[in-house]
């Protein structure tokens, strides 16, 4: 048997006449319509299809929230608001975008350490749910609520006493800057009762970018156990238990799409009992990248093609400053290539390996390292897939003072 080289998971965008098609529009025409490269394009149909497929797979009682920081473009958030049950924001600015969608404030939650007084004031005035990240924050919220003459809605973000295995970014278990340690939560619940705040429930988020269903199942079980244990000490009935998310998408060769089957089966099995024991509380899953990541591409144009000692470099007008994650510098330990294609030469035969680089004066400005791509020419359009989440707003756009990319939703 010969070992086959790992490949990227198949892309979700259709191809017509060797051109990638986004939102029904062939890429060269879309580029002309946008008026410049580089740009990010997000496909409404793929966004909708992803939410529909997820809802069809999961038990109907699960509520779905969109974690806006994955892609806070207002048009995207507006589109998502029509598909999901709630929005999770991470800043006062994201909160304003969320409120603009018309989403009911009670279905918007605000997580993140170190929320500013201005942001907390906005949140209380808007009547959204504040996920408390510390005991200091609890006191601050109570004081601000008193000043405003309003009763803040609060949930406790719990730093669990377990961690999600195999997740790309660990956000729970052990000492963390996120949430309140599970063992401190009973005292915090007593204090919430004493302060007369409107207690919403718990937010237990234990990780991100997980492609292993068995570890998500395990996290769900541990989360239910912890949520039920803490609910017994709550000052009033739990209205919602947010069990986090962490569903990953395949970025690198050899990675496959998450198998929702075991996750859905486990939820279907456990949910009736958990809901009954919580007096019918809402069970929420919050997802960012899983909902939007695969529906977006980053497009840049080849501006130069050079051969250096036998190796081909495709130089583009886009790079690390627009798409830090694809360059491998957003938390990755080992740099691997995102899926990349020449969007106007889809299906053409592969040429010798080439590297796709940007215009920055650093060797880190690499969008694709020694990739097999068709023979590309100056003027061709390079597409980086899996770019709908943590792309534009997760990038250092001011670095080297180039123009910013444009974002479109089609
Ligand atoms: C970032 C974040 C998410 C979204 O993570 P994804 O990996 O994009 O799904 C969800 N909840 C919280 C609390 C977060 O901080």
Image (cartoon, rainbow, N blue to C red):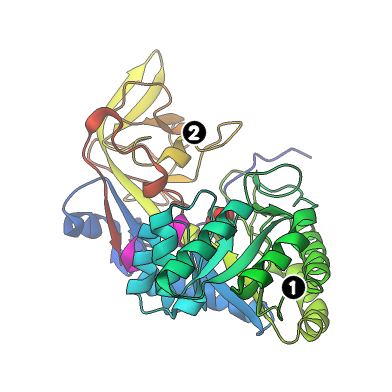
- In the displayed structure, 331 sits above or below 218; it is above
Q: Main secondary structure of the magenta part?
A: helix
Q: Quadrant of residue 400?
A: top left
Write down the region rendered in magenta.
68-76
Residue 137 position, x and y percent, is: 56, 55
Q: Residue at x 50, y 78 (%)?
A: 106
Could you tell me which secondary element the residue under label 1 belongs to?
loop
Residue 18 position, x and y percent, is: 35, 55
Q: Are marks 1 and 2 in contact (CB under 8 Å)?
A: no
Q: Is residue 143 left or right of residue 170?
A: left
- In the displayed structure, 45 sits above or below 176; it is below
Q: Nearer the viewer, residue 379 or 364?
A: 364
* Ligand 1: quadrant of the figure: bottom right
Say whether disc 1 or disc 2 marks the residue closer to the N-terminus. 1
- The quarter of the rendered structure image containing the N terminus is top right
Could you tell me which secondary element the residue under label 2 belongs to?
loop
In this figure, which residue is indicated by the disc labeled 2? 329
- In the displayed structure, 102 sits above or below 38; it is below
Q: Residue at x 76, y 55 (%)?
A: 184
- The quarter of the rendered structure image containing the C terminus is bottom left
**Mark 2 within 8 Å of ligand 1, using the beta carbon:** no
Which class describes the residues within 10 Å of circle 2: few (<14), some (14-19), or many (20+)? some
Which class describes the residues within 10 Å of circle 1: few (<14), some (14-19), or many (20+)? many
Q: Nearer the viewer, residue 151 or 85?
A: 151
- In the displayed structure, 61 sits above or below 365; it is below
Q: Is residue 267 left or right of residue 10?
A: right
Q: Which residue is at the far top?
A: 309
Examine the rendering and report whether any part of residue 265 can be seen: yes
Asked if residue 35 is among those painted magenta in the image, a careful observer would answer: no
Q: Quadrant of residue 315?
A: top left
Examine the rendering and report whether any part of residue 43 can be seen: no
Which mark identifies residue 234?
Answer: 1
């Amino acid at each position: 048997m010969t070992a086959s080289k790992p490949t990227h998971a198949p892309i979700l965008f259709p191809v017509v006449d060797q051109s990638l098609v986004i939102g029904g529009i062939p890429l060269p025409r879309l580029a002309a319509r946008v008026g410049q490269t580089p740009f990010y394009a997000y496909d409404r149909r793929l966004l909708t299809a992803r939410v529909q497929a997820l809802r069809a797979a999961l038990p109907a009682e699960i509520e779905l929230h969109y974690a806006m920081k994955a892609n806070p473009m207002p048009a995207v958030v507006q589109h998502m608001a029509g598909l999901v049950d709630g929005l999770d924001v991470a800043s006062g600015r994201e909160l304003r975008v969320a409120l603009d969608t018309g989403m009911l404030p009670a279905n918007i939650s605000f997580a993140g350490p170190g929320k500013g007084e201005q942001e907390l004031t906005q949140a209380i005035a808007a009547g959204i749910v504040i996920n408390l990240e510390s005991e200091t924050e609890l006191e601050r919220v109570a004081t601000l609520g008193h000043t405003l003459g309003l009763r803040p809605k609060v949930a406790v973000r719990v730093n669990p006493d377990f961690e999600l295995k195999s997740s790309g970014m660990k956000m729970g278990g052990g000492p963390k800057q996120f949430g309140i340690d599970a063992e401190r939560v009973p005292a915090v619940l007593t204090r919430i009762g004493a302060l007369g705040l409107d207690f919403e429930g718990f937010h237990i988020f234990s990780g991100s970018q997980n492609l292993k269903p068995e570890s998500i199942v395990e996290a769900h079980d541990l989360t239910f156990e912890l949520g039920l244990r803490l609910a017994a000490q709550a000052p009033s009935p739990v209205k919602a238990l947010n069990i986090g998310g962490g569903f990953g998408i395949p970025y690198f060769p050899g990675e496959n799409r998450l198998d929702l089957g075991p996750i859905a089966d486990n939820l279907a099995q456990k949910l009736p009992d958990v809901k009954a024991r919580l007096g019918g509380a809402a069970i929420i899953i919050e997802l960012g990248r899983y909902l939007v990541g695969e529906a977006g591409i980053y497009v840049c144009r080849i501006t130069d093609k050079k051969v250096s000692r036998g190796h081909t470099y495709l130089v583009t007008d886009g790079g690390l400053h627009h798409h830090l994650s694809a360059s491998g510098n957003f938390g990755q330990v080992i740099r691997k290539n995102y899926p990349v294609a020449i969007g106007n030469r889809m299906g053409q035969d592969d040429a010798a390996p080439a590297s796709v680089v940007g215009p920055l004066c650093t060797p880190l400005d690499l969008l694709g390292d020694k990739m097999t791509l068709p023979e590309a020419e100056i003027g061709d359009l390079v597409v980086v897939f899996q770019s709908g989440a943590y792309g534009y707003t997760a990038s250092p756009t001011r670095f080297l003072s180039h123009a910013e990319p444009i974002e479109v939703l089609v």
